[in-house]
Image (tube, helix red, strand yellow):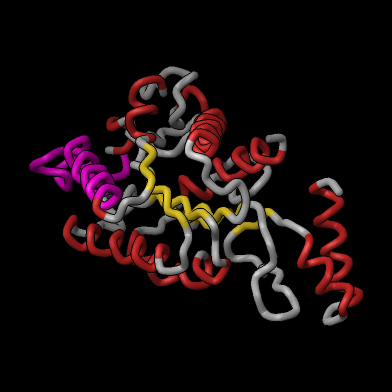
Amino acid sequence: MNYINRRQTVKYVFSAIAGTALMNSLLRNASFAHTAGSPFPFKGNGEPAIFDIINSGVGGNNTVDMLKRMEKDCLIHKPKLTILMVGTNDMNSVKHVPLPEYEQNLKEMVNRIKATKSKVLLMTILPCYEPDLLTRHSEAFYEPEGVSGRRKQINDVVRKIAAEYKTYLLDLEHRFAAIGKIGTDKDSLIQNLANTNKRDGIHPTANGYRFIGLTVYDFITDHKLPASGIVCFGDSITKGDGSIDKDSYPGFLSKLLKIK
């Protein structure tokens, strides 16, 4: 059964024969892709149904926000693999979280995820194009370390926690900085005037999300990590367009895993 037919079947079963043995049988043997904030199917025994990937990204989230929602958007699904990227909002002025609190929050998230026996893949946050970022945030806010220094502090904490808690680590910052062409060119992997008609400087383009999806796919394959039961937990950079089949890294990852 292909993905589209599987979703149509599940929708029909829910509406027509909810609570019957046939629904329970279908849910035990089906797999899903899913997005945060929408109802999630459960087996008849109350356990989460088997799923491929959940896009659990929410725009504007910092570590405080994610701690508040991690039970309903991550842990309840009992993931085999949790991909965690957070810190972009923590380092900026609107949702700022001081570095010691950020570190403590990230540790708590990793602890709670590991307690469910899920494997954890931490990812460093992406570089930005500072002139565009500073159209929305005061340069003085980042003093004395500056934007790049603030980002380095965040990513140093991510690397430290990955080592301390023996999680997997994917350095997206390095990959984007090396080949993402961060700047004003149209082929930059970060949104700018030339490629999206807006001075963004933080969020990936569609090709940027495609690049993240491919990079995560290669990491999963190389490290023999679970290829289903994956929760992608994060902020707007995880959310993308909010889908699991279009312009989001969970969406591109889902497509790659389906043809593995």
Residue 205 in view, yes or no: no
Name which residue lies at 54% across and 57% down: 80
Q: Quadrant of residue 147?
A: top left
Quick one: 14 or 164, which is closer to the camera? 164
Prevalent SS, magenta region: helix
Q: Is residue 64 above or below residue 215?
A: below
Instruction: Give the extent of the magenta segment.
Output: 135-163
Indicate left or right for 222 with 151 as reference.
Answer: right
Residue at the extreme right: 16
Name which residue lies at 71% across and 56% down: 32
Name which residue lies at 42% across and 64% down: 113
Q: Is residue 160 above or below residue 223?
A: below
Please state the horizontal and vertical placement of residue 82, each as a whole percent of the image. 48, 55
Indicate left or right for 110 with 96 as reference.
Answer: right
Q: Is residue 150 magenta?
A: yes
Q: Is residue 194 above or below residue 243?
A: above
Q: Is residue 200 magenta?
A: no
Indicate left or right for 16 with 14 as reference.
Answer: right
Residue at the extreme front: 224
Q: Quadrant of residue 172?
A: top left
Name which residue lies at 21% across and 35% down: 148
Residue at the extreme left: 144
Please state the horizontal and vertical placement of residue 59, each as a whole percent of the image. 47, 54
Please state the horizontal and vertical placement of residue 3, each as a whole percent of the image. 79, 48
Please state the horizontal and vertical placement of residue 229, each as a whole percent of the image. 60, 56
Quick one: 106 or 39, which is closer to the camera? 106
Residue 190 in view, yes or no: yes
Give the quadrant of the C terminus: top right
Q: Is residue 187 above or below residue 236?
A: above
